[in-house]
Amino acid sequence: MSPLSILFIGLAMSTDAFAAAVGKGAAMRKPRLPDALRAGLIFGVIEAITPIIGWLLGRAASQYVQAFDHWIAFGLLGVLGVHMIIAGLKPEEEDVAEDASGSQHKSFWSLAATGIATSIDAAAIGVGLAFLDVHIGVVALVIGLCTMTMVTIGIMLGRVLGNLAGKRAEIIGGVILIIIGCTILYEHLHAAAEVVGAA
């Protein structure tokens, strides 16, 4: 596999994370560059680990991952999106109370859960790469670096969207996450329908 192909895989695997990061950035209160880099690092590490897990699972797990990856991603992103919308609809006083009680801890797990949801496809990619002549460590590193960069940019873009949208920007972030989940589900079901139609 050529270096250019590996780079394209890295960019392709980071697009869902980028879109989710824009939603997260819109939901955050004026995220700074360190916040964006922290989110990028969390997403990047998760996105680098998942293809390695898929690669290790190999042929035995390939059918399972391909059959359910879109449902897992859809469910996680949907739940997170609804949670963000509900949080955005709460009165300001409730938001402040929640922020005061371990918001950093909640933020980490929220980012990690979103990172896992957007990296499910990377696990399936890893399974496919198990049968190719490619160094999985190099591929995983490229995917992780691409994701870290794209998420950092996405968070900062989300900050602009957040400032324009006002106090309820978290609702926009939730809607974006739900749209991403629905898109992942649609793409997989549409591809499956085409395969059945061709047969």
Image (cartoon, grey):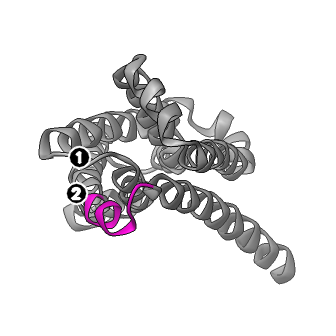
- Can the viewer see residue 55 in this picture? no
3D distance between C-alphas at marks 2 and 1: 7 Å
Q: Are marks 2 and 1 in contact (CB under 8 Å)?
A: yes
- Left or right, 185 with respect to 177, comes to right
Residue span colored magenta: 159-167
- Residue position marked by numbered label 2 in the rendering: 156
User: Left of 118 or right of it: where is 182?
Assistant: right
SS category of the residue bearing label 1: loop
The residue labelled by disc 1 is: 31
- The residue depicted at 22 percent of the width and 57 percent of the height is 156
Residue 189 vs 113, above or below: the answer is: below
From the top left corner, tell me how far across and down residue 92 is, in percent: 48, 41
Quick check: 45 left or right of 101? left
Residue 173 x %, y %? 48, 56
**Main secondary-structure element of the magenta-colored stretch:** helix
Q: Pick whichever, 194 or 59, lies toward us.
A: 194
For residue 95, say whether it is visible: yes
How crowded pointer 1 is (Cα within 10 Å; few <14, some 14-19, many 20+) is rated as: some
Q: Amino acid at mark 1?
A: Pro
Task: Give the quadrant of residue 169.
Answer: bottom left
Disc 2 residue type (three-letter): Met
Q: Is residue 124 magenta?
A: no
Write down the quadrant of residue 135 in the picture: top left
Q: Tell me which numbered mark, 2 or 1, is placed earlier along the sequence.
A: 1
Q: Secondary structure at mark 2?
A: helix
Give coordinates of residue 25: x percent, y percent.
33, 52
Residue in the foreground of this view, choosing between 8 and 144: 144
